[in-house]
Image (spheres, rainbow, N blue to C red):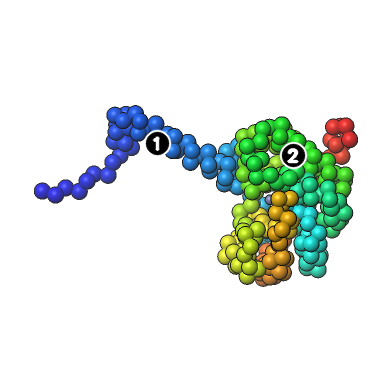
């Protein structure tokens, strides 16, 4: 007579694996690799350190912009935000800040929050040691402080990739990881319409949203023009839905800059 195969219980699986050590080892290796991949690649993974990806106020959202300052796009983004009286957060690349210190000063002067987004956004940085990351953070914070008088506490990992060494350096420097809940994939040469659609489809109250106003030092030939074109429609949509756009300085319950005393305590 036909019998339906029984669904294996965890005990059955355990017995099977005990009888086949190689199978158990392969399973453990596969699981370990998957877990490591999740820990490093998923921007919101909290495995190495706590990561902020939402804000408490569910009637608000936080617009964030990465990879600037790049005058060709950061300037127009700032103009759009100013015209609509919107404050946002900019995660700046140290090398870009060094060439555009006046843009850093303008971002802060116009009421936006700034954060650290590494010195050069090198994609090989995922393999960097703790001292590599300490230097990436320190150089960037120093340039941002020189340009704006602010030393950021917020750090966004390049591409959202986090590693153990990086997390150690971030925590030792007294910085805090910020990721996002929604990103528009606007570095992938997609149209303003698509960028807007992704945001509209996914946004919920309390979200941290990520767009790009800047170019990584290794991507100088690219353009964020579609982001600039999409931004007014995104802001309009958020307002229609009743969300306030807030800079992270106003949305988080801890100071987003080191006290100047801390800076001078470090020797200037
Ligand atoms: Zn980036």
Horizontally, residue 49 falls left or right of residue 80, namely left
Decide if residue 58 is in sight here. no
Percent position of residue 195, x then y: 63, 65
Q: Residue at x 10, y 48 (%)?
A: 1
First in sequence, mark 1 or 2: give its number. Answer: 1
Q: How far across and how far down the image is residue 214, in percent?
A: 74, 56
Q: Is disc 2's CB within 8 Å of ligand 1? A: no
Residue appearing at x 63%, y 70% in the figure? 193
Q: Nearer the viewer, residue 221 or 143?
A: 221
Name the quadrant of the C terminus: top right
Work out how far the residue at label 1 is from the one at label 2, CA to CA, in angstroms: 37 Å
Question: From this viewpoint, which residue is outermost toward the left?
Answer: 1
Q: Residue at x 35, y 30 (%)?
A: 22
Can the viewer see residue 8 in this picture?
yes
Vertical placement of residue 150 versus 48, above or below: below
Q: Quadrant of residue 17?
A: top left
> Residue 136's x, y, as percent?
74, 39
Labelled disc at residue 140: none
Q: Is residue 255 left or right of residue 2?
A: right
Secondary structure beneath disc 1? helix
Determine which residue is flagged by label 2: 136
- Which numbered marker is on residue 27? 1
Residue 10 vertical placement versus 156 (above, below): above
């Amino acid at each position: 007579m036909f019998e339906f195969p029984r669904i294996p219980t965890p005990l059955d699986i355990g017995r099977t694996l005990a009888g086949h050590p190689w199978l158990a080892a392969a399973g453990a290796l596969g699981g370990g690799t998957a877990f490591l991949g999740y820990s490093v690649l998923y921007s919101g993974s909290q495995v190495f350190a706590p990561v902020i990806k939402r804000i408490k106020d569910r009637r608000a959202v936080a617009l964030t912009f990465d990879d600037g300052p790049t005058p060709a796009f950061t300037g127009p983004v700032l103009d759009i935000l100013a015209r609509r009286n919107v404050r946002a957060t900019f995660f700046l690349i140290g090398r870009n800040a060094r060439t555009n210190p006046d843009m850093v000063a303008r971002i802060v002067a116009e009421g936006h929050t700034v954060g650290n987004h590494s010195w050069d956004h090198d994609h090989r940085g995922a393999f960097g040691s703790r001292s590599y990351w300490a230097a990436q953070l320190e150089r960037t914070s120093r340039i941002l402080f020189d340009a704006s008088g602010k030393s950021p506490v917020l750090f966004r990992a390049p591409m959202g990739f986090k590693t153990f060494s990086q997390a150690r350096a971030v925590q030792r420097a007294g910085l805090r990881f910020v990721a996002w809940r929604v990103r528009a994939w606007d570095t992938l040469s997609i149209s303003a319409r698509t960028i807007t659609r992704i945001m509209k489809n996914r946004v919920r109250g309390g979200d941290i949203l990520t767009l790009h106003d800047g170019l990584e030092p290794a991507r100088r030939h690219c353009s964020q023009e579609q982001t600039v074109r999409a931004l007014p429609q995104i802001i309009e949509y958020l307002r229609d839905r009743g969300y306030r756009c807030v800079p992270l300085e106003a949305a988080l319950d801890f100071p987003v800059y080191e006290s100047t005393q801390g800076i001078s305590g470090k020797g200037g």
